Amino acid sequence: MGGTALSLRGISKLFGTFRALDQVDMQIENGTVHAILGENGAGKTTLMNILFGLYQPEEGQISLRGTATTIPSPRHAMDMGIGMIHQHFMLVDSLTVAENVALGLPGQGMTLDLDRIADRLAQLSAEYDFDIDPHQEVWKLPIGMRQRVEILKVLFRDADIIILDEPTSVLAPNEIASFLDGLRRLRALGKTVIFITHKLDEVEAVADNVTILQHGRVSAEVRVAESNAKDMARLMVGREVVHDKMDRGDSKPGEVIFRADGLRARDQRGIEALKGVSIEIRAGEVLGIAGVDGNGQAELANVVAGLMAPEAGTVTIDGVDVTTSSAHARRHRNRLSYVPEDRHHTGLVLDFTIAQNAMMRDFNVPPFSKWGIINTSQVRKTARDWVDRYDVRMRSIDQKVRFLSGGNQQKLIFAREVECDPRVFVVMQPCKGLDVGAIEAVQRTVMRERAEGKAILYISTELEHIMTVADRIAVMCAGEITGTLTPDEVTDERIGALMGGLSEKEAV
């Protein structure tokens, strides 16, 4: 299918005096997958929000299928055949999957035929290998499954132009391969896909064309068949990116700092999520936890951080039993830091400013406060220092955190948790939503903490990130550790077998 699905000319967007988009020109061809690349804060999501009617541009013209148009609201966008899957979920947790899909669905009249909706969702779920129960309440679903619900919402409405904002950021490797196959099927059926991602291997695998944004402007247009990941990374950040070649240095682990023995815990649904997990981490060592999302990694992180009490087992830090200690005590008495998976619900208060979020971990201790009085000037000084050193792109430290890009939100959390000089550092999906340059910076920071003798628990569904930083890799499946490998021992077949539940001996 030829022709132009969507054309943008001179699109500009201001937030106060900040110019988020500056004269953006872009053309999306019918029946193609068009990737949008750029560093965190480059304007990618802002541009997509304009296409979906969430924002209105100050300048410029949008043409849809050759006809000039305006998109005043998401309802108008959906009526025009444009669907958007947001990076952060637009779901009502207390409702079922089918009820979430039904919200705002036209043509319902006085009755709501949930059975018909559920039947269609079950069909789509099977077609795309999503394994979702339409009658399941959303709050009971793991994060990866909630992302699939968002995808189903758009597929259910049969949009012709589908916008995806970092849709694979919460998916496990095997899920990503299936998802990319789904994009290829959409393209084969004549759908047009606009795909925001930081993962250049995904761009190479599925995209036809790429638009690269820098500081709100189009810096390059690339045909994927004529380029490669290295060139695209350089165009994104303006320099060579070398995180995949990082010199990790020699591993010289010291004494055991952290130990968990026989941990058992249940998730929010009452299902046993940890089944006797035991791990230990030495000073100057990174233990990576690999596995398909939803196999107990989140519960392990929460038990270690003190956010969830185990049903059985013990947690010790520097030989001290902290199993019954609060999260607050572990953070301040035992020097444990935690970068959570869900930055919106656990890591940040979205309507607080950057400065307020920066002090949130230690707001009641020096240097941020004394005798119960917050030292505002010190808070602001520290926040300015952190946003500069961790390259948090923002307008002002008084800006609400909800208006930062997802990657910049993550970098702020990372700065806050590293700068308190932890003894044990727990990170859950620390590179989620980050561009290639920011991933490199995060991994270098992890390596620095390792060199300083910290015990680091690094949990990620992205094996390539774990391989870059980990000294040992423990694989989780169905709430158990199925095996522990060094990076040199990892092969696709062996790690896949362990993720599938085979024991270490069976996986050899």
Image: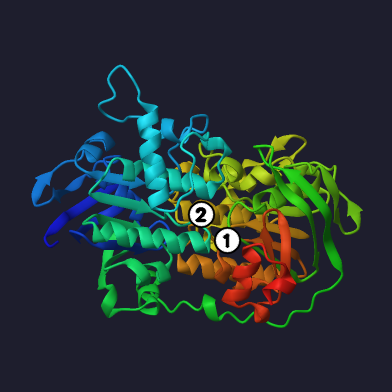
Whether 444 is drawn above or below 339: the answer is below
Q: Secondary structure at mark 1?
A: loop
Residue 428 pos. (x, y %): 63, 56
Q: CA distance from mark 2 to mark 1?
A: 8 Å
Identify the residue at image location x=30%, y=59%. Answer: 185
Mark closer to the chain start, 2 or 1:
2
Crowding at mark 2 (Cα within 10 Å: few <14, some 14-19, many 20+): many
Identify the residue at image location x=71%, y=72%. Answer: 506
Q: Choose top left, top right, bottom left or bottom right for residue 79.
A: top left
Residue wearing tag 1: 461
Whether residue 286 appears in this view of the structure is: no
The kind of residue on which mark 1 rests is Thr
Residue 114 pos. (x, y %): 39, 28
Q: Choose top left, top right, bottom left or bottom right for residue 168.
A: bottom left
Asked whether 48 or 296 is in front, the reply is: 296
Residue wearing tag 2: 170
Asked whether 365 or 505 is in front, the reply is: 505
Whether 425 is drawn above or below 116: the answer is below
Q: In which quadrant of the rendered image does the C terminus lie?
A: bottom right
Asked whether 102 or 372 is in front, the reply is: 102
* Residues at circles 2 and 1 in contact by the CB criterion of under 8 Å: yes
